[in-house]
Amino acid sequence: MLYPQTNAMRTKISLDGFWKFAPDYHNTGEEKQWYKGIPHDREIGVPASWNEQFQDLMYFFETGWYEKEIEVPKIVEGETIYLRFGSVHYLAKVWVNGEYVGEHEGAHLPFEFDVTNVIRCGQKNIITVAVDARLKADRLPPGQVQHEMIVGFKGQYPENNYDFFPYAGIHRPVMLYTVSSTHIKDMIIQTSTEDHKGIVDYTIFLNQAFNGEIKVTLDGEVYENIVVNNTDTICGQWIVSEPRLWSMEDPYLYTLAACLTQEGTTIDYYELKIGIRTIEIKDCKLLLNGKEIFLRGFGMHEDFPVIGKGMNHAVITKDFNLLKWMGANSIRTSHYPYSEEFLHYADAHGILVIGETPFVGFVKSHYTNPTIKEKVKKVIQEMITRDRNHPSIIAWSLANEGDTFVPEAEPFYKGMYDYAKSIDDTRPFTITNCIDVEEDVALQYFDFISINRYYGWYDQVGRLDMGCELLDKKLDRCYEIFKKPIIVTEFGADAMAGLHMDPAEEFSEEYQAEMVERQYNIIFSKPYTIGAHIWAFADFKTSQTPSRVVLNRKGLFTRERQPKLAAHKMKENWSK
Ligand code: GCB
């Protein structure tokens, strides 16, 4: 799916700003035909979660109704008009001028509707969105899983089976965009290298068959100028003789542009930023452009005061600034696909990304549930088709910490791997494990091993020496079992900013700093490891539970992005 852009042939109109809002406490708004006008009692900011914008919405997990009036300029009359949402948490139903245009389930990926026939150009229009945020066991990630919830999350409020707050609302930008009736619908770019040459394979999909000329350029240089007859897909290969390979040090992006013309008139134009690079696992090493790399960085969250999980350009900028300041080179989009804006920034600034699905906290009953299996496929398909052209995405994580010790997990995750690989065979896949690897029935099917380990925190409480010793041993055992490269995707300790203790104890800045540095060094020292991601980048909000002081405090930065002692220590370590 292409990210909308404004150029000579396309217009995009932002619908971000203040929307009317009405909480639908009993989920009966549709019966009451609120799409003809919502009984709003306030205005609310978009994009952002609704929870922190009003005190009474903090724990509101029913349906929230949004409404926006927009005058659509007359000049776009005759164009095809799409209404697009970057992401809505969780299930969105959409009406334009009272007419139902469609719905989308799933919280972290974009969706759009062709609204050409319902939008009135040159007039005012009403967009209405019902956002159903109920926490349910068959939603991704899952809400209440009743009896199967793991001890740590049992009884937490709100009842979700994972360790982050289930923020709700219109989380990413909303826009109308226009294209001509025949237009470029999607592109797939795959890059490789051979004998110091860069190879760019591209496929361009049009929304319908086209007669005319298609011109493709790379950084302005014409590659193909072909006349097509009744064609909706074109493929080509570009050989770049002295390629500037995309890397962390030089994240150079080429501009691949496609232009459709008919009898000398331009019909559509689209520019895509691409990076020429290779990524592979070979002899237990992770290679970027053929060179060994070690992933040092973090698991993160989209989470910030007031906006919750809302996309905000300044927060993204700040986070990348801090990643660079630390000397980190990579992150995992724990535990769901992040915004498109985030990935554009990663491409432009050379931060490597492991893209993760929202499949976190799966339990036995999920593995045998046909509805879940279908939803899982849909999300994988939507995530990969949205993100496959990003050079920054170097690997996929298909799940975080499911119950992978039950026999039902084996066919489930194997099926997931095969399905995902059939869509993208250019990147390695993993799932992250948190149980004893000897009992894991799913990890064996993946290209590399990801483990989350809290030795010296949840186990060996307060005894770092013991924790470090165990980490060392367990890593070796893990390699012995799988003989595949390993990344420790999570390790760390909570620290309350400002709490200092000597000797270091749990929750002090000293304990966290000592733990992450010692454990990082152990992981880094192993010949079979390909990375170490500290949990977490910044403190983040969770459900209420006795083990969290409002936030998960494992961040090396506070929720407001101020560094703790561990951030300074690791900055020093990573600059060596
Ligand atoms: C984990 C989870 C992560 C939690 C973290 C913790 O293993 O993957 O979502 O936040 O542990 O702090 O307990």
Image (cartoon, helix red, strand yellow):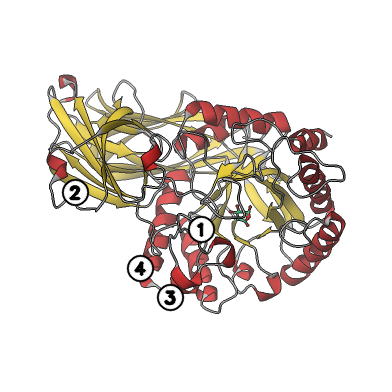
Secondary element under disc 2, as helix, strand or loop, is loop
State the quadrant of the C terminus: top right
Give me the C-alpha separation between circle 4 and circle 2. 26 Å
Residue picked out by circle 3: 368
Q: Label 4's element?
A: helix
Coordinates of residue 384 in the picture (x, y in percent): 46, 50
Q: Amino acid at mark 1?
A: Gln
Q: Position of residue 179 (x, y in %)?
A: 25, 31
x%, y% of residue 287? Answer: 70, 48
Q: How many C-alpha atoms fall within 10 Å of the one at disc 2: few (<14), some, or many (≥20)? A: some
Marks 3 and 4, how far apart at CA: 9 Å
> Could you classify mark 4 by the number of other residues whose Cα lies within 10 Å: few (under 14), some (14-19), or many (20 or more)?
few
Q: Nearer the viewer, mark 3 or mark 2?
A: 2
Q: Please, what secondary structure does the residue beneath circle 1 have?
A: loop
Q: Nearer the viewer, mark 2 or mark 1?
A: 1
Between 477 and 559, the one lying in front of the other is: 559
Residue under circle 1?
156
Q: Which residue is mark 2?
A: 29
**Dot 4 and dot 2 residues touching (CB under 8 Å):** no
Dot label at residue 371: 4
Instruction: Point out the quarter of the image occupied by ligand 1.
Output: bottom right
Contact flag, marks 1 and 4 (Cβ < 8 Å): no
Q: Looking at the picture, does residue 250 appear above or below residue 107? A: above
Crowdedness near tag 3: few (<14), some (14–19) or many (≥20) residues, C-alpha within 10 Å: some
- How far across and down, in percent of the image, does residue 203 sit? 41, 44
What's the amino acid at mark 4? Thr
The residue that appears at 18% across and 21% down in the rendered structure is: 73
Residue shown at 53%/64% (left/top)? 154
Closer to viewer: mark 1 or mark 4: 1
